């Protein structure tokens, strides 16, 4: 059962009389989002108080007593028609403000030469009073200084920090407490659940978008097209395109040889998002397992061409529910999309024409 708890900065209110709940969670995103419908009685004092327009009330969302999102109510919609319609409120987790807003003037100068990523994060998050967490897996990379870096005047905080984090292969996410999280998943982490064919209430769809994939990627850094001294990375092969020739070249605007090579690696990792496994559940959780982004699962299901036990990372989860049903849709991708490890072809050894 979903419960919404609202703080209007004067009183804490518990709200559980709503329907059409939608919760969206994503791993590589600075904020999650939510919406829900409820019956609004204009003569009910409690309804008027928590439905205040433009107050940006703080809130938490709980499922079976466990906090799954800490955020803020952004928008509200009231409807008056002959047939009674429900009102709707929506919002996102606390760090969402960083994707909507430019860098605060109090954080100027925009140039942060000689600062580490952790120092830059502290500098730009402080005016918004947004807390952040650095996972031990990326602490060392967060403490390396940038020789030169400058944010754009109209650039959002999220955009700039993502730009810097991506150059270090660091994932920016958020947690249930409304904090920004700098992390990188551990490829050796144990899966929280194993799915198989014909499980009750479970359906799966596996997709491979070959048009968006390339056989190898080359990253080049050059100041102009005629620059004969351009830095070029070694071609990075894509194990999911092992037979045909489909090359791609990307251009890196600044950095060094290591930066260019990492750009090529990151480009291949991004292409792996075209290998997707969608798992739909007729409930929010199975047993005690609540599925959230960043967790690993394993799957064996020949019906979707998974003949061997295969590991996936949950990239996003969409929860929807009302008084009669609950549905969770998990979008999963190969772990190498986020772990930084060299990708491996998950179907290796099952085809006689490409045995591996």
Image: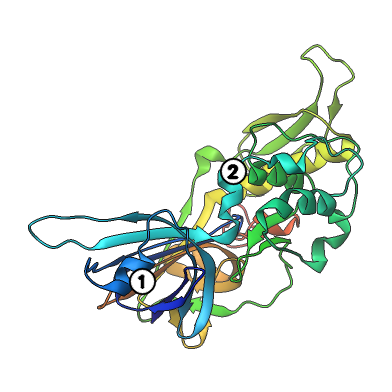
Front one among 60 and 192: 60
Q: Which mark is residue 164?
A: none
Pinpoint residue 295: horizontal percent, then vertical percent: 61, 71
Q: Which mark is residue 101?
A: 2
Pinpoint residue 151: horizontal percent, then vertical percent: 74, 35
Using a 10 Å C-alpha cutoff, classify the residue at mark 2 as few (fewer than 14 neighbours), some (14 to 19) or many (20 or more): some
Please give the name of the residue rendered at 55% of the width and 45% of the height, measured from the top-left corner: 100
Question: In the image as oriented, which residue stretches furthest toward the left?
Answer: 82
Q: Give the Cα distance between marks 1 and 2.
A: 33 Å
Q: Quadrant of residue 137?
A: bottom right
Please give the name of the residue rendered at 36% of the width and 68% of the height, measured from the top-left corner: 49
| 191 w.r.t. 263: above or below | below
Front one among 141 and 207: 141
Q: Nearer the viewer, mark 1 or mark 2?
A: 2
Using a 10 Å C-alpha cutoff, classify the residue at mark 1 as few (fewer than 14 neighbours), some (14 to 19) or many (20 or more): some
Q: Quadrant of residue 204?
A: bottom left
Pinpoint residue 226: horizontal percent, then vertical percent: 80, 11
Please give the name of the residue rendered at 90% of the width and 46% of the height, measured from the top-left corner: 145
Pinpoint residue 129: horizontal percent, then vertical percent: 68, 58
Residue to which mark 1 is pinned: 327
First-in-chain label (1 vs 2)? 2
> Circles 1 and 2: CB distance less than 8 Å?
no
| 160 w.r.t. 303: above or below | above
Which quarter of the image is occupied by the C terminus? bottom right
Q: Element under label 2? A: loop
Front one among 295 and 271: 295
Q: Element under label 1? A: strand
């Amino acid at each position: 059962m979903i419960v919404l708890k609202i703080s209007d900065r004067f009183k804490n209110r518990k709200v559980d009389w709503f329907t059409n709940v939608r919760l969206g969670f994503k791993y590589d995103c600075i904020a999650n989002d939510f919406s829900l419908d409820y019956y609004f009685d204009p003569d009910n004092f409690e309804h008027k108080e928590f439905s205040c327009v433009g107050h940006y009330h703080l809130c938490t969302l709980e499922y079976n007593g466990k906090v799954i999102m800490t955020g803020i109510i952004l928008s509200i919609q009231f409807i008056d028609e002959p047939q009674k319609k429900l009102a709707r409120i929506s919002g996102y987790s606390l760090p969402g403000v960083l994707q909507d807003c430019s860098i605060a003037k109090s954080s100027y100068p925009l140039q942060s030469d000689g600062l580490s990523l952790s120092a830059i994060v502290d500098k730009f998050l402080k005016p918004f009073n947004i807390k952040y967490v650095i996972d031990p897996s990326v602490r060392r990379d967060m403490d390396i200084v940038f020789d030169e870096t400058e944010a754009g005047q109209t650039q959002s905080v999220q955009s700039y920090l993502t730009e810097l984090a991506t150059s270090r292969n660091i994932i920016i996410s958020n947690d249930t407490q409304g904090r920004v999280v700098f992390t990188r998943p551990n490829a050796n982490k144990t899966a929280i659940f194993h799915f198989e064919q014909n499980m009750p209430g479970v359906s799966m769809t596996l997709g491979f978008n070959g048009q968006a994939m390339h056989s190898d990627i080359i990253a080049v850094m050059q100041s102009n097209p005629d620059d004969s001294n351009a830095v070029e990375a070694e071609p990075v092969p894509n194990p999911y395109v092992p037979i045909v020739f489909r090359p791609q070249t990307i251009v890196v605007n600044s950095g060094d040889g290591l930066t260019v090579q990492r750009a090529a690696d990151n480009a291949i990792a991004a292409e792996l998002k075209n290998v997707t496994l969608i798992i739909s559940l007729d409930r929010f959780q199975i047993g005690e397992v609540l599925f959230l982004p960043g967790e690993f699962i394993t799957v064996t299901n020949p019906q979707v061409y998974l003949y061997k036990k295969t590991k996936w990372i949950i990239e996003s989860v969409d929860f929807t529910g009302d008084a009669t049903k609950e549905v969770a849709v998990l979008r999963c991708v190969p772990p190498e999309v986020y772990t930084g490890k060299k990708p491996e072809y998950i179907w290796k050894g099952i085809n006689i024409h490409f045995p591996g």
